[in-house]
Amino acid sequence: MRASLQLRTPTTGYFQKQHAVAVPGAAALAVRPNPVDGKAQPLVVCHLGICPLHLNDAQDYVRLEPPLTLRNHNASKFNIRNVHDAAYDHHSGLVLFTHGSAIFGLDCANRVTQVAGDDEGGLIFDGPAAEARFVGAQRLAPDGRGVTYIRDRDSGSRNGFCLRALYEATLPHGSGGSGDRAVVTVHIGGNVGPHAMTYDRRRRSLLFATRGRAVHELLSYGITQELLGTDEPPAAAARTGAAAAAASASSSPSDYSDDEAYDSGRPTPAATPPPDRLASPLTNVQALAADADSGNVYILDGTTGSRTMLRVLRPDGSLDTLDEPRIGPAGSSRWPRLAVLPYGHLAVYGVSGHEMMVLTP
């Protein structure tokens, strides 16, 4: 269902503290249960390796801890420099990594294994995980129930991306992943793929943007809808809204199967949407991150890698502007990344090559 948009006054200062954590070449961030005590453990993939993010007594993330000692690292051909994204999958219990032409997993014993794809790449091929091929897997979003959505490179699409899905069969009685996996291409129409994406566990659907002014929601059977904003040009959006209003106004009682029974409950004709609903409230979606605890979906909305707007789409459909942070040097062309950390923190990274921004409420 499309968000019932309510634009609110910018909430300046929602995040009370903003500080930098020294991270050389941050490429990905994932949060898994700590194998020792079960508490949330953020892991940052950077030039040092896969490093836990240290949380001090004041509930602030202040520094990196030494990198994990990986098992099976050499035999698996896992290379930190090839990692583009990471996410924890509740279904398999693995931290999954996009690794160009392959997908890797890290278990609770810090053992690395290849779960899909191979070292060849170069083409898109669906099938059993060991036989599947990726051109350049870069982003992923697990749903926690056996499906992990993957953004792959595709020179044949209009924006250079396509959507793939890694499926894992479930053990009897729903007791977790079986290890049997396959990869398929998910066709979402429009000959485009996701640029930014996140899985929203509250809505139980994938949310994505295609380098535009809208957040789309993936429904069943590959059907998509614009959840927030629109990718249509303003003039086209106005014509669409006016046409919908005219069609509704011209509907007659004969449109109903039982005029008498439905007369009192018949919906009134829709008026032409106001101008602020015809124009997209978004400028250019750069990154998305869904918070499973609050149901909020955080959005970085901007046109440069130096300044952006941090916005939040709340479960009730309202859209707030939380902050307008400076996230990188002037003139930067690198797009930012966004991740939700435990205890209400947010991390912005990918623009500065030597630091990660942590926002604390």
Image (tube, helix red, strand yellow):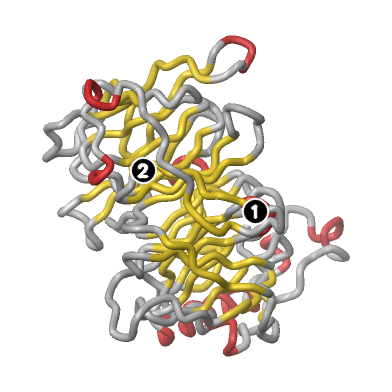
The quarter of the picture where the C terminus appears is bottom right
Sequence-wise first label, 2 or 1? 1
Q: Is residue 60 left or right of residue 86?
A: right
Determine the secondary structure under disc 1. Answer: loop
Q: Is residue 160 left or right of residue 11?
A: left
User: How far apart are labels 2 and 1 at the CA level?
Assistant: 34 Å
Say which residue appears at 63% left-offset and 77% top-offset.
Answer: 322
Q: Is residue 176 above or below residue 322?
A: above
Q: Position of residue 314 (x, y in %)?
A: 68, 64
Q: Which residue is mark 1?
A: 56
Q: Nearer the viewer, mark 2 or mark 1?
A: 1
Q: Which residue is mark 2?
A: 150
Q: Position of residue 20 (x, y in %)?
A: 49, 68
Q: Is residue 79 left or right of residue 308?
A: left
Q: What residue type is disc 2 on? A: Ile
Q: Is residue 293 above or below residue 173?
A: below
Q: What residue type is disc 1 on? A: Asn
Say which residue appears at 57% left-offset and 64% top-offset.
Answer: 298
